[in-house]
Image: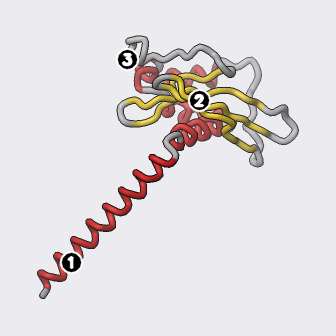
Amino acid sequence: MRRRLAIMGVAAAVAVLALVGLVVLALQLLDPDRPARELALRDARAAAELDYPQLWRDYSPCWQRHNPEASWLLAQRANRDLEPSRAPADTRYSVLAVRRQGVYRRVEVRVEAPGYQQLDYEIDVRMYGGRWVKVDRGSLGHAIADDCARGQG
């Protein structure tokens, strides 16, 4: 009897995991650009909130190898003519568009902070090593600079 209950418990757990996997797969099929949008929004928020460690983590491993975290973080804090200020707490972040360009997703983001002019720019992301990473950011339509694609990885 105990063995039967144990087998039923394992079977139920496997069924639940399979169901969760199917739900995740369905979400990916219905909205394949969701991970790219989420990465771009997280990165836009990190930039506005001066969260330099998060900005560094969002980049591709190739870019990170050329920009070691400690020295890059030091440079971000040192290379300022004026002390930057964090975005207000009620700042809004939104994705205006996601455009596919080969392996890349060009994600157009908007940052709106009360009392400031809205800022629209583009964050370029791609799948690398099984995860979405940022490869570049800049004005809308800029040429993408990707350390991994240039053979510098």
Answer left or right for 24 relative to 11: right
For marks 2 and 3, the one nearer the N-term is: 2
Location of mark 3 (residue): 153
For marks 2 and 1, the one nearer the N-term is: 1
Please determine whether, in this image, residue 60 is positioned above or below residue 28: above
For the residue marked with disc 3, what is the amino acid? Gly
For marks 3 and 1, the one nearer the N-term is: 1
Q: How far apart are marks 2 and 1 (CA)?
A: 47 Å
Q: Which mark is in front, 3 or 1?
A: 1
Answer left or right for 100 relative to 131: right
Give percent across and percent down for residue 110.
72, 35
Looking at the image, which residue is at 77% across and 48% down? 90
Looking at the image, which residue is at 75% across and 47% down? 89
Give percent across and percent down for residue 47.
65, 33
Answer left or right for 26 relative to 79: left
The number of callouts visible is 3
Task: Evaluate whether residue 16 shows in this view.
Answer: yes
Looking at the image, which residue is at 35% across and 63% down? 19
